[in-house]
Amino acid sequence: MKTRNRDIPQKIICLTEESVETLALLGRLDLVAGVSIFVKRPEEAQSLPKVSAFTNSKIEKIVELKPDLILGFSDIQKDIARDLIGAGQNVWIANQRSISEILDYILLLGRLVGEESKALALVEGFEQKIEEIKLSAKSLKFRPKVYFEEWDDPQISAIQWVSELIEICGGIDIFKDRSRGKLAAERFTKQEEILERNPDVIIGCWCGKKVRLESFKTRQGWSSISAVKNDLIFELEPEIFLQPGPALFVDGLEIMHNLIKEVALRA
């Protein structure tokens, strides 16, 4: 057992949420020594030391905790990674953007902490759930056009994994053409584009603040959009949809499919 313990990191800092939930589902939340201030899943992780926001971290506090490994996500955290590496820390910044890459990330993290078989079972379960939702979505007689908004100023449309989720669940992402943009700036939208594409449903999912649903109705020209006319404007939780991890499959698939199914039935 001592040899096995030396093979895996014993103290991990998680700068974002998806790594925390993944480790928890693998039965290794005990390895997590610090988390993001935004962590919500699982609930017991909320009592762990808070050491990071998304764009800044408490470098000195992290170093004091003496972690074996620090996990982060995306190019947005490159400056945090630089500072931590400069402080002599081991850092892994993942950049998963698609559903396939998220499943690969779960497998990689599972191998890293010596839980490959659990990770494989977890991923296989998620893949089965995806296929079940796809099959259910095929029975929809109407596929609603969806505008998914990550941020309101500037307006940012769905990242790739959300766009793919919408399509799996029976909807049509009106900005699928730009969802593969690696940078948020590549997913900026303009008022006239949204008016032209005329979504049947609007989903607000703003990272870090509550969505003001009424604000969509007061935007210039938006009263002509089908979603606004029919009051099909919804808010979804960022901790489920804007973290590239298990939450998308544990809860996100069903939530999105039920929402799209509700809109389709109203058509």
Image (tube, helix red, strand yellow):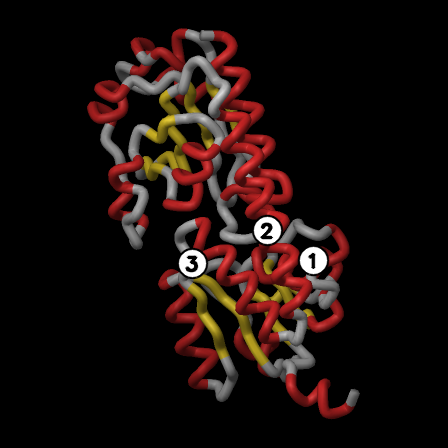
Residue 239 in sight in this render: no
Q: CA distance from mark 2 to mark 1?
A: 8 Å
Element marked by disc 2: loop
The local secondary structure at tag 1 comes to helix
Mark 2 or mark 1: whose residue is earlier in sequence: 1
Furthest residue in direction bottom, as rendered: 3
Name the residue type under label 2: Pro
Q: Position of residue 154 (x, y in %)?
A: 31, 39
Task: Residue lying at the far right in this picture: please name it.
Answer: 1
Instruction: Name the image quarter holding the N terminus.
Output: bottom right
Residue that appears at 59% across and 51% down: 246
For disc 1, the neighbor class at 10 Å (few under 14, some 14 to 19, many from 20) is some
Name the residue carrying label 3. Answer: 96
Q: Is residue 37 left or right of residue 199?
A: right
Q: Residue at x 63, y 69 (%)?
A: 116
Q: Which is more toward the observer, 114 or 207?
A: 114
Residue that mark 1 sits on: 25
Q: Are marks 2 and 1 in contact (CB under 8 Å)?
A: yes
Element under disc 3: loop
The residue carrying mark 2 is 246
Above or below 188: residue 13? below
**Residue 109 vertical placement versus 189 (above, below):** below
Residue 180 in the image, given as x and y percentages of width and height: 30, 47
> Which amino acid type corresponds to the residue marked 3 in the rendered image?
Gln
Closer to the N terminus: mark 3 or mark 1? 1
In the rendered image, the quadrant that contains the C terminus is top left
Q: Position of residue 10 (x, y in %)?
A: 69, 80
